[in-house]
Image (cartoon, rainbow, N blue to C red):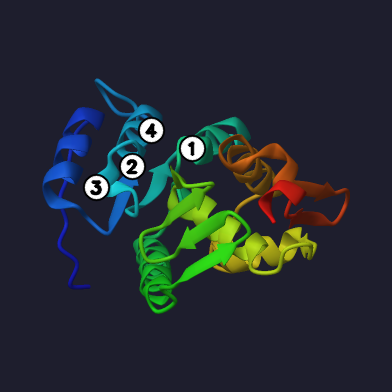
Amino acid sequence: EGYQIFTATNGQEAIKSAKKNTPHLILLDIMMPEMDGIEACEKIRKISALENVLISFLTARGEDYSQVAGFEAGADDYITKPIKPKVLVSKVKSLLRRLKSEKLNEETVTIGDIIIDREEYVVYKAGIRISLPRKEFELFSLLTSKPGKVFKREVILDTVWGNEVVVGGRTIDVHIRKLREKIGDDHFKTVKGVGYKFVLLEADK
């Protein structure tokens, strides 16, 4: 398919390879020697030069709690094995297409005291820089595109994760919780049985 591939046999090697090569996409297994994939993902997400790298788990661990742990660690996608090579290539292409389309929408948006830099994938709130993993940033960008509008869960899943990625509703909840911790709990409102909305506070105006 024309991709340049770098391999690693454990989590430590994966981090070293990512630092050296700055790939567009990292595929991690959870079950790896020396350092498991969850810890490796968390460490990669803390490296500023790799903030915008796509990370997907490719693992035989299909339990709900493993998927939640993967997304909480900062993964953009979670693929379970066994999977046919053609299907895997299709998923990789889908992720990389999303990466290209995101680059076409580079701009800076200001909402109250919040600045969203879509080129750098960074949010500034009251002048404080907040780095977000890719999927958290995409979710935040969607919700802030129309403050006060309720986005249905199915719309969020389709817009942020796409039709080709199968994730559960809990994935949204995990990412919303992360955003509440980083941006502020009061900005994100749950509309029970429907979805979520972003609201501006009086202090932001």
The local secondary structure at tag 1 comes to helix
Image position of 175 (left or right of 129): right
Pinpoint residue 53: horizontal percent, then vertical percent: 32, 53
Q: CA distance from mark 1 to mark 3?
A: 21 Å
Q: Counting residues from the N terminus, which is met first, the one under dot 2 or under dot 3?
A: 2
- Find the residue positioned furthest to the top: 34
What is the quadrant of residue 134 in the picture? bottom left
Q: Secondary structure at mark 3?
A: helix
Q: Earlier in the sequence, mark 4 or mark 2?
A: 2
The residue singled out by tag 4 in the image is 42
Residue with the mark numbered 3: 49
Tell me the residue that label 2 is attached to: 28
Per the rendering, the mark at residue 70 is 1
CA distance separating discs 1 and 4 = 9 Å
Kindly check if marks 1 and 3 are in contact, taking CB atoms under 8 A apart as contact. Answer: no
Q: Earlier in the sequence, mark 1 or mark 4?
A: 4
Q: CA distance from mark 1 to mark 2?
A: 10 Å
Furthest residue toward bottom: 104
| Callouts 2 and 3 close, C-beta under 8 Å | no
Q: CA distance from mark 3 to mark 4?
A: 14 Å
Q: Nearer the viewer, mark 1 or mark 3?
A: 3
Query: Which residue sits at x=52%, y=68%?
Result: 109
Q: Amino acid at mark 4?
A: Glu
Query: Is residue 44 at least partly visible in the picture?
Result: yes
Q: Is residue 23 above or below residue 187?
A: below
